[in-house]
Image: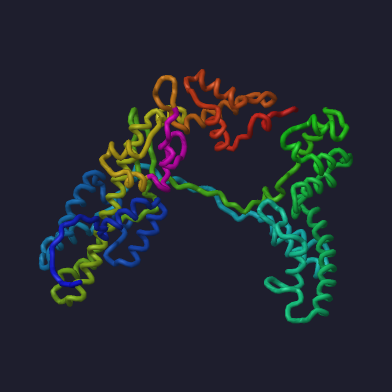
Amino acid sequence: MAFDLRQELRLSQQLVMTPQLQLAIKLLQMCKLELADKIQQEMTENPFLEEVQEAEKETSEEGEGSTIERVDSELEMFTNVKEGTRLEWKDYIAQSSNESYIPFDEREEKESFEAVVTKSTSLADHLMWQLHMSGFTGEEQEIGELIIGNLNQDGYLQPSLAEIAKVYLFGEGREEGEGNGTHVTHLNWIRLLSVLQKAEKVLQRIQEFDPLGVASRSLEECLLVQIRFLYDERDLLEKMVRFHLSDLERKKYQAIASALNARMEEVVETAKVIAHLEPKPGRPFSDQEPQYITPDIHVFKTGDDYTVVLNGDGLPKLRISPFYLKSLYNSSSSAEVKNYVRDKMRSAIWLIKSIYQREKTIRKVMESIIKFQRGFFDHGINYLKPLVLKDVAEDISMHESTVSRVTTNKYVHTPHGIFELKYFFNAGVGSEGGEGVASETVRNKIKEILASEDSKHPYSDQEIVEILKKQGLTIARRTIAKYREMLGILPSSRRKKFY
């Protein structure tokens, strides 16, 4: 076998991700808050980027469209500038001294924030306060703190009392006889049983705290604690909770009445009482903070048309710093300084152009969505149409992946509320007229039908099929069941009310 070395030319195609393209893709899929963080980071690292001050913003009254076109052409000129060309940079300094290069529409007034946010009392804080006011001994108080510290957000005790007692005695990550021999282990077990008995007493007292039933280890225990302190006549209540919780869930009142030898009316009345108990004592003290959505886009109706306005509130307006730009044509600067300045200048221009491109692309996608979903914007959710990414991509002559990035993690404020951009893309469901209906529209119709049903005679899935058929929608029963489950609605047998 012989080996030889030779040179040859090959022609091939490959996709090269330039730094500009990588930056544009990253910015495109960012939401407004992420973009604001990115801009602040770039401004910190790049001295060429400068925020336009409020006083200078007010002096700029040029229209948005013409500004974008002018800056695009100017930035293209400076991107291709050759070393030694000095006149264009001087002109740029003169022009950029009082103009913004990220024009966001400011026709919409800033939303006011009038509410004062305060930290609410957590369940743990509420219980700790009661614990310290209840006259416990030092040992009991430490055990109580361990119990309270191991409650979940619903107010239930997650570990067993044996685990609580072990942690109290030996700390986390240590075994009870570790390194001390069998005799000491035996003594530790005696201590463990003693602590376990104290922990059981402390737990019972904590369960009597407000809210009643907190620190329970099961739903049954939680309800029994509340029954014990709220009702005098509780024999039937306790029996139904102890032995028939699953039947109560399925509303099998006749089976409960037969098993307990009770009248049907008594069982129904007792079920009404149990229904008013709190199955999740920690719910009023939930630590989950509400998630506030800041829309990236606003859509306003002006006459018969809709106007798309990007939310620029909180986003700094950028321009190239004239001060640092002077060093680019300063003849006394060294080659190293000029190279550094040129790199930073190029990076600043890429960022500005990428933000421009992001704004244009989002606007194009939103305008296309409005065109396809005009019925929704005019009349509401029931007029949503089936729509896929490919439809919008072909309409604006872009790739589907670009449209996907634009619609990811971005929200729009419409006349009908705030929606994620992906909300407008739905699979189609057939109708008698041949025209598809969006799956979200079908879910909304199911929700409306069930909201108006008689609670004593709820609609079955088949009855919902018949109602929708009268409205021109032919949908299979299993599809109705799937959509109902997606909406978190129980089947008719469990929605039925006997009182």
Magenta residue check for 33: no
Q: Residue at x 81, y 42 (%)?
A: 243
User: 73 and 486: which one is in front?
Assistant: 486
* Image coordinates for residue 426, horizontal then vertical, percent: 42, 35
* Image coordinates for residue 372, horizontal then vertical, percent: 35, 32
* Image coordinates for residue 77, horizontal then vertical, percent: 15, 56
Figure coloring: rainbow
Q: Residue at x 44, y 45 (%)?
A: 111
Q: What stretch is highlighted in magenta?
A: 407-429
- Drawn side of residue 145 relative to residue 428, left or right: right
Q: Which residue is drawn at 16% across and 72% down?
A: 4
User: 256 and 312: which one is in front?
Assistant: 256
Q: Residue at x 44, y 20 (%)?
A: 432
User: 93 and 415: which one is in front?
Assistant: 415
- Drawn side of residue 344 relative to residue 386, left or right: left
User: 196 and 233: which one is in front?
Assistant: 196
Q: Quadrant of the N terminus?
A: bottom left
* Image coordinates for residue 356, horizontal then vertical, percent: 28, 50
Q: Quadrant of the C terminus?
A: top right
**Would you identify the image quadrant in which residue 304 lies?**
top left
**Would you identify the image quadrant in which residue 232 lies?**
top right
Magenta residue check for 419: yes
Q: Is residue 125 visible?
A: no
Residue extending furthest top? 470
In the rendered picture of this protein, how many numbered marks are placed on residues?
A: 0
Q: In this view, does 64 lie above or below 330?
A: above
**Would you identify the image quadrant in which residue 54 lies?**
bottom left
Q: Is residue 372 visible?
A: yes
